Image (cartoon, rainbow, N blue to C red):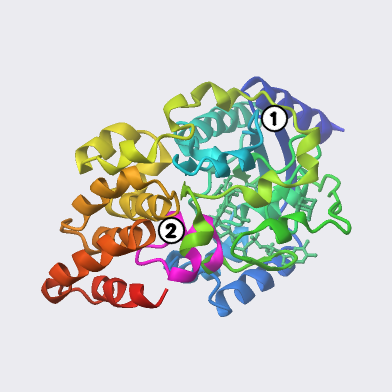
Amino acid sequence: MYQKHFIEEIKTKSAELGFDEFGITNLENFEFNSSKIKEFINNNYHGEMHWMKDKLEIRSDPKNIWSKAKSAIVLGINYGPTNNPLKDLKKVKRGYISIYSRRKDYHKIIKSKLKVLARYIQKIESSQVKVFVDTAPLMEKPLASSAGLGWQGKHTNLVSRNYGSWLFLGIILTNIYFRNETKIKSNCGTCSKCIEVCPTQAIIKPYSLDARRCISYLTIEHKTHIQKDFRKKIGNRIFGCDDCLAVCPWNKFAKKYSDIKLSYIKKLDMPNLKTFLSFSENDFIVYFIGTPIRRLGYNRFMRNVLIAVANSKDLSLIDYVLKKLDSRNELIRAMAVWALFCLNKSRFFLEKKKRLDLEEFYYVRQEWLNGEYN
Ligand code: B12
Ligand code: SF4
């Protein structure tokens, strides 16, 4: 009875702080998830995210990150968009930034709220707590599912009855033992919209994502060249992808308003590709300061912009692309070659004559050489 009252108090405080979803789970019965993450790593689905492999043992059981942990208090914040983001993908002269990143970095906002809630819990009951958002080796989605916030959809993200697929997650681990609240069973049924919509077929079967194929991974985590097969499918997406979330029928029940929307940054809502092409490294830093895009770094950002430019069919961008052929960074140079090839073949061959013999870098040379066969 006491525990029920205690949980109600934490729930009320979490709502006051702006959290939309709340649940508690103890850390028992995690074996299924441990075996699945091992399978994920064995299949190399993590690609260049070596930190996932390096911390596999810790990540595979929440008790490994903190041996005293007995339960997880799981919080969710709705970041559902007011419009259907799939429509933005048709605006090919503009860059698509995924919905979660069109705002101040959510990590900081959620972490500060978690800390306030953690201190509140400690005031009620003397206990130890640790807070986590995203970056620690902890499997947040399975914890959210077992705390009753929703279920892991076939796209692998957590789906909530109240907010659909648009929820950020945050975790407080505590040494207090809680009995488990009711877990929600999967409500995906026969639906497979997220699997079908994925442009790169990254969801290779229900509940299983090969991150190496995921546009979110390719544009955010992948540090080197992006394979040619994926470039057209990336379209105008320059940071992340929302297709599998946006198509989920459970979004129609999603409530729209959330506290985190207060930090929405209007200029990140479908900005012009032309503006970005003329950015210097310093312009990039100033423009994206305090947003998740800043962490991408200038070179990868420009790599992504040039892929979107290649797909834009906007011939007015050619002069900007030509300038990028002189970039000192080979990642940028390579994608400038590709963009030129896509926008204007005759100019491509003209530039190739002048530049190929002078080019030292293997990947850039490949772009000049392979262009002919596309
Ligand atoms: C690595 C990572 C990525 C990688 C890999 C994604 C992935 N699906 O693994 C990449 C870069 C691709 C990525 C992309 C995105 N991410 Co991300 N990411 C993470 C991170 C850091 C770890 C995820 C992880 O552990 N993956 C490993 C796999 C093996 O675990 P899993 O996905 O839970 O897999 C389970 C299922 O496969 C399941 N399973 C397998 N078979 C079966 C069968 C059945 C029947 C069932 C029920 C389950 C099941 O078992 C596995 C273990 O439970 C988390 C934060 C965190 N610390 O947890 C954020 C996190 C998952 N990302 C998040 C977000 C928002 C995104 C993006 C939407 C961002 C964007 N717009 O671009 C996309 C979504 C892409 C997608 N469809 O997953 C949110 C998701 C919130 C939510 N509502 O679920 C998180 C939780 C961050 C946060 N704190 O809010 N991400
Ligand atoms: S789109 Fe369909 S299959 Fe995918 S998560 Fe939503 S309900 Fe489940």
The residue that mark 2 highlights is: 221
Q: Which of 26 and 230 is in front in this view?
A: 230
Crowd class of label 1 (few under 14; some 14 to 19; many from 20; radius 10 Å): many
Label 1, label 2: how far apart the Cα atoms are:
28 Å
Magenta span contains residue 228: yes
Assign the C terminus to one quadrant of the image: bottom left
Give coordinates of residue 85: x percent, y percent.
61, 39
Sooner in the amino-acid sequence: mark 1 or mark 2: 1
State whether residue 260 is above or below residue 43: above
Give coordinates of residue 367: x percent, y percent.
30, 71
Give coordinates of residue 139: x percent, y percent.
61, 57
Q: Which mark is residue 20?
A: 1
Does the rendering let one see residue 160? yes
Looking at the picture, which amino acid does disc 1 mark?
A: Asp
Q: Does the Cβ of the disc 2 residue fall within 8 Å of ligand 1? A: yes
Q: Nearer the viewer, residue 24 or 129?
A: 24
Question: For the magenta stretch, what is the residue range?
Answer: 213-230
Q: Main secondary structure of the magenta part?
A: helix
State whether residue 9 is above or below residue 190: above
Q: Does the Cβ of the disc 1 residue fall within 8 Å of ligand 1? A: no
Q: Is residue 170 left or right of residue 147?
A: left
